[in-house]
Image (tube, helix red, strand yellow):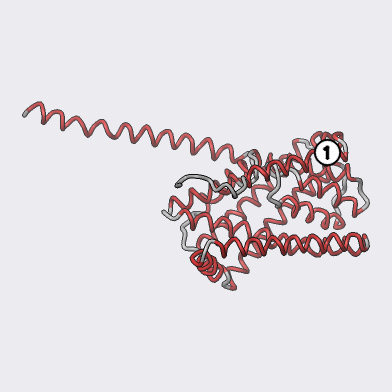
Amino acid sequence: MTGRRRPDRPDRPGWSVIGGVVVLVAVVVAVGPSAAGRGLRSVDPATVAAAVAVGAVGTALAALRWRVVSDRLGLPLAWRGAVAECYRAQLLNSVLPGGVVGDVGRAVRQGRAADDVARGLRAVVWERSAGQVVLALCALPALTAVAVRRGSGTVLEVVGAAALVAAGAWWVRGAVRRRGRPAVAVVRTDLRALAAPRTVAALTGLSLAVLATHVATLLLAARAVGVAPSPRLLGPVLLVLLAGGLPINVAGWGPREGAAAWAFTTVGLSPATGLAVAVAYGALGLAATLPGLLVVATRGRRGRRGRRGRRGAVRPVAAPVEEETARA
């Protein structure tokens, strides 16, 4: 029985990828592939350089947020190491299906270093959740404003979205309860540790700062496409970022592009422009993760050196033993 998969448990990463592909293809077909091509062609070296710089700030802030959570959960985490791990995670999230492989990797490595993988996983989950909660709270006024401008039809959409969020929260609550009292106790202990006023203030401030870097990158993408950055774009930008956090995607692509094609129409722009901005943002986001290649390459070399060193360290030990055996 050990090691077998439960037949009633779906392959969630697989369904996530399939759902992301379906959404992305549907949006591109509906809006037109020329809009996606426009987004890619609009990215120039100067915009890429600016996105990499903004991404560096965002990565450093996200690493600091991770360190705050880890410290409250009793896990040691050096800030420089956290920055390197965040870059690596962002790179893997941007090129592998699901958009979470990199985060799982950094959580497992941190947990193994502290001999507590479960706690490492929880630290990353809480760190990412802090950012998503702040994003949702910032996007809610934008969604409400859209509902007021667009009329009753959009109000129904907002109510439906809120119902889905509530259903998701209820499902998570039930999933935790099904794992038994130990899981509930662990979650409560973590929440008590993270609910200290100074910790909440730190996580909120850092999450707002990280969100600002994502907004800046999306505005860079809009400017590259030909849309002048202005306060009116803040609402659509937040909605696009919120959709990008949904677990149905292909390395971040899918619902984000669909949301952009719709959200930008709320400020008088065409769906094609929204899709072009989202595609440009995806390309800039990928470029901003490229420093993660240096992390992967550097750690790969260190790992090979470490293995060679361990193999070499065994040989000198055997020589004295052989000599004493020969004398005997």
Instruction: State the image coordinates of residue 25 (x, y, percent, origin top left).
Output: 79, 38
Quarter holding the C terminus is: top left
| Residue that extends furthest to the top in the rendered view of this protein | 326
Query: Which kind of residue does numbered mark 1 sit on?
Result: Val
**244 or 82: nearer the eye?**
244
- What's the residue at 58%, 45% (across, down)? 102
For the point 44% across and 37% down, the residue is 303
Q: From what the image shows, is residue 196 above or below residue 183?
A: below
Q: Nearer the viewer, residue 51 or 281?
A: 281
Give the residue displayed 58% in from the left and 71% down from the top.
Answer: 195
- Left of 29 or right of it: where is 79? left
| Residue 84 screen position, x and y as percent | 55, 46
Identify whether 227 is placed above or below 191: above
Vertical position of residue 262 compared to residue 324: above or below: below
Residue at (48% x, 56% y) in the render: 118
Question: Residue at the left extreme?
Answer: 328
Local SS, label 1: helix
| Residue ID for mark 1 | 28
Count of numbered circles on the image = 1
Query: Picture coordinates of residue 3 (x, y %)?
Result: 47, 45
Residue 66 x/y as whole percent: 56, 57
